[in-house]
Amino acid sequence: MVVTSLKLQDLIEEIRGAKTQAQEREVIQRECAHIRASFRDGDPAQRHRQLAKLLYVHMLGYPAHFGQMECLKLIASPRFTDKRVGYLGAMLLLDERHDAHLLITNSIKNDLSQGFQPVQGLALCTLSTMGSADMCRDLVPEVEKLLLQPSPYVRKKAILTAVHMIRKAPELSSVFLPPCTQLLQEHHHGILLTTMTLITELCEQSPAALRHFRKVVPQLVQILRTLVTTGYSAEHSIAGVSDPFLQVQILRLLRILGRSHEESSEAMNDLLAQVATNTDTSRNAGSAILFETVLTIMDIRSAAGLRVLAVNILGRFLLNSDKNIRYVALTSLLRLVQSDHGAVQRHRPTVVECLQETDASLSRRALELSLALVNSSNVRAMIRELQAFLEYCPPDLRADCASGILLAAERFAPSKRWHIDTILHVLTTVGTHVRDDAVANLIQLIGGARELHAYSVCRLYSALANDISQQPLVQVAAWCIGEFGDLLLEGNCEETEPLQVEEEEVLALLEKVLQSHLSLPATRAYALTALMKLSTRFRGDNNRIRQVVSIYGSCVDVELQQRAVEYNTLFRKYDHMRAAILERMPLVERGGTRVEEEEKESNKAAQLSEAAAPVPAEPQASKLLDLLHLLDGSSGEAPCPPPQDPPPGGTLVHLLDLPCAPAPPAAIPDCKAFERDGVQLNLSFIRPPETPALLLITVTTTNSSGGDVTHFTCQAAVPKSLQLQLQAPSGDTVPARSSLPITQLFRILNPNKAPLRLKLRLTYHHLGQSVQETFEVNNLPVETWQ
Amino acid sequence: MIQAILVFNNHGKPRLVRFYQRFPEEIQQQIVRETFHLVLKRDDNICNFLEGGSLIGGSDYKLIYRHYATLYFVFCVDSSESELGILDLIQVFVETLDKCFENVCELDLIFHMDKVHYILQEVVMGGMVLETNMNEIVAQIEAQNRLEKAEGGLSAAPARAVSAVKNINLPEIPRNINIGDLNIKVPNLSQFV
């Protein structure tokens, strides 16, 4: 190789020197070619440099997958330098989806058991970053051993690796649960911190572990107390607070352990009160601890006084000048608003003030919290604030704010008029951001409030006259004007200033909407229909309307064209019906959610299928119901007459006689259901292959006796989960010793493959006697329903 | 859990990219770009918390960032981490870098990307906080660096030899040695001195 490849530093220099993206790509591609060649046949001692360069290039976004195998080779090398880069490469380039990752398992195993400490640390780090479930299971014994090794450096890493392993393979928690008790007695903060994480993970995964660890609550309280009361410790303190990270982890764990458990909560009460009152919050670290304390207090079963203290602390933080603190305070209050609504309500004024923050994150949090705080007593004030916010809030919050206001208005509106006003205001301010169903909701609302029709139409008309660009508003206004145009003309609405409107003005406005390029096709459709309705509401002649309608008969938009043509026809040919057709709309039923509709549909479907199940055109329906009852009761009621072997040839012949029976795919054996005095009932079964849930039974009644069988009827019943349909029998008479049997076809639908049970009731006249037999067929072959 | 740690400069060039959850490479780059755009929009006197973009996690994830001179340090975390705690953690990380690199600046991060990764591995492992005691971290890193130097023995030999030769104090060499009729021209060895 004549051209030597660059050192990492030089490569970086060159990349930085590249003036354009293309130049940079060129440099990198050249270097990658070198790296590839070097991997193939280069000096093994230099391999780690090559991989380091590759990792740099990878960070910039260039493909580096050809380095994956090199990582493996470097990890297997005995040198620490090689292992370091190799493991880093494995963490950055390999993951579970590549098969190569399993190859590292052996190297990791060796390094964990025989390597010296830094190497063990590297191996643990890699395992905890990209270890798959299989790898974790393989390496459990090694990691477990390292948990109890003397060196804290390796132990803390082993503990965190255990957390990762439990996440990937939850069954391993039983392995890592026992060492925890011993680990809690360590003094090294690194070990304690990681042990807290491990215990937290164990408790979150299994309730049994949670119960087990409740026993260590006193120990945790002691550790925390020591931390709180210890003065300055050079090693771990941040801004004068000793190891805030460990304190926060302990508080978190206490929260999980004390949740809905009286005893544990009690054990922590004093300590929490102490921390809450004594923590110095002039620096960030202290505030972090205080927040965790507050959240823990609110989550466990703490004394009422303590809870009040906690919420007041949050309220105080809301007034803090540090924006981060305010943000966290708002987030915490949001978490509490469900459980402690009353306490949070007290801070409502401060929250509302936060709406005016310029910071987008803060105002978003404040908005969420404000919406959660709206209730029936403060709804007017809150919505007023929120409406004011809506006018100047940043664009990405508008949609949320609008839908929030509409939802709150729907839930807590004190009066219909207020509700309509609120929705109107939202539509005028941010009409384009509201949800699609806002229009339908408003129309429904207005339609339902008879006394407000005049009021609504006046207000909507004024709003429309001002601005025809907000589509939802225009749609609602057009609908209203169309419906209540006569009320508009009367202009005697007592709640707003009287509006003197002429017919021509209204028509002109609607035409403007029709012609405006700002109007969506749906809006135009609304306007056209409104115009048409006005033809009956207004008393003037309808020339103008007719003109507009006929113009749109040749509109490009198909929907509009269709409407216009229909309306035109209404004018020309069906003028006598026009008034009736264009009457006031009846109130539309509030459509429930789709789920309700589906339920209704499925209910209807169920009813239909139930109706289909009973035998059609059966005169003795009540007796049939009795049969059904009997069948659904306990099994094995009516004794079945002992079956005799039917002549196999005979039934096959009957089978072939049947007009509508398709060829059986796999012959199901026939079964003889009944025999008495020469009268025999045979069942033959067919299951069409294309509809496996369907079973066709042909009931063949033969008479080998000397007397005729007359007035023969056969009724049947099946369990409720199956559906039965009886077709008309071929006849009701079987002459004596005849080869002309009565056949009847039963159709049974068995979609759930439930076991088939069949009860039959026969009535006939035979040998001068009236015979009635009710029995269950209990030798049905299994193939009929499996 | 910490999902990702990103360090990039004021122009969006990545200086350190570490993900603790698996994403394909293109998505990783997209996340870096998206995060940069989100963070760039923020003024300097507002809070350090951002709702995450759409690519990285969902509504549960937040971006917690700090701006130091020309670099943004961004930690993407889920709701199980304390937000103020992470702010302190970023501070610990940066101070550790400072101790390891002697007044760290952006160039140090650029030219020693691998070393920065090794330092980060001592602070955060597998998305969880491992150690926050700066002295311990620095001691470990220095021990590992010494190991590397000791091993570098063989491959660093040519470099050492050159620097050893450079440091030899050679006596003054005459340019011309005149011995009677012989005139020996001594080649110029100055480049090795």
Image (cartoon, rainbow, N blue to C red):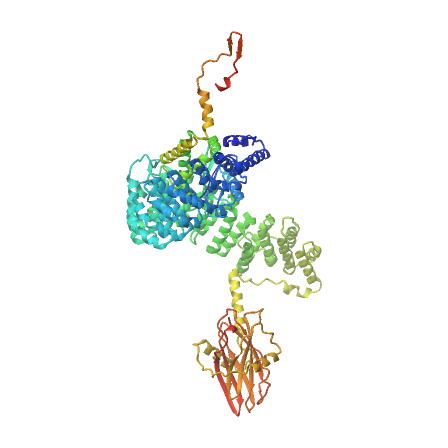
- Residue A296, can we see it? no
Q: Is residue A697 left or right of residue A74?
A: right
Relative vertical location of residue A782 with respect to residue A282 in this rendering, above or below: below
Q: Nearer the viewer, residue A699 or A270?
A: A699
Which quadrant does the N terminus of chain B fall into? top left
- Residue A504, can we see it? yes
Q: Is residue A140 left or right of residue A398?
A: left
Q: How many marks?
A: 0
Figure quadrant of residue A712: bottom right
Q: Nearer the viewer, residue A186 or A388?
A: A186
Q: Nearer the viewer, residue A174 or A275?
A: A174
Q: Nearer the viewer, residue A144 or A412?
A: A144
Q: Is residue A148 left or right of residue A43?
A: left
Relative vertical location of residue A161 with respect to residue A449 in this rendering, above or below: above
Residue A477 x %, y %: 59, 54
Residue A760 x %, y %: 50, 81
Report the residue that reaches farthest toward the front: B181
Report the residue that reaches farthest toward the top: B180
Residue A301 x %, y %: 32, 52
| Residue at image coords 28%, 41% | A226
Residue A759 x %, y %: 49, 79
| Residue at image coords 44%, 19% | B168
Relative vertical location of residue A209 with respect to residue B184 in this rendering, above or below: below
